[in-house]
Amino acid sequence: MSTLAIVVILLAVVGGVTYLITKGKIKDENNNNIPDVVEEKIEEIKEQTKVVKAKAKKLTDDVTKAVKVVEKTAKKVAVEAEKISAKPKTKKTSAKK
């Protein structure tokens, strides 16, 4: 589709909405040429976004805490592994007669 066709379609849609608003077929209480239905939907989306953002923040904090715990545990395991590998191995002598 060419750019010109897209622009023409977009202008037709905007013109149609403007015509319907002026005729009173689409509600626009505050006369800002944005249909009230669109404004209400935007408000709903903003509220949902706030809820999702709060959940994401909480999950991020929980994951950060879990990673810190894993990091501490891994360091402890590494220290213990180093201690085990640093111990000299003793040979068991068997008594042969």
Image: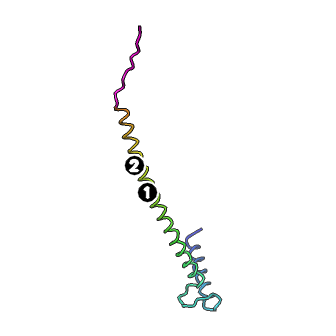
User: Does the stretch in magenta take in 42?
Assistant: no
Q: Which residues are magenta?
A: 87-97
In front of the other: 67 or 94:
94
* Colour convention of the picture: rainbow
Mark 1, residue position:
65
In front of the other: 27 or 64:
64
Identity of the residue furthest to the top in this view:
97
The amino acid type, in three-letter code, at marker 1 is Lys
Find numbered disc 2 in the image and state the secondary structure of the residue it sits on.
helix
Residue 23, position in %: x, y? 63, 92
Q: Is residue 94 above or below residue 59?
A: above
Find numbered disc 1 in the image and state the secondary structure of the residue it sits on.
helix
Q: Are marks 1 and 2 in contact (CB under 8 Å)?
A: no
Residue 89, position in %: x, y? 36, 25
Query: If the image is split into quadrants, where does the C terminus sit?
Result: top left
Mark 2, residue position:
72
Name the residue located 51 percent from the left edge and 66 percent from the top edge.
55
Q: Main secondary structure of the magenta part?
A: loop
Label 1 or label 2, whichever comes before in sequence order:
1
The quarter of the displayed image where residue 5 is located: bottom right
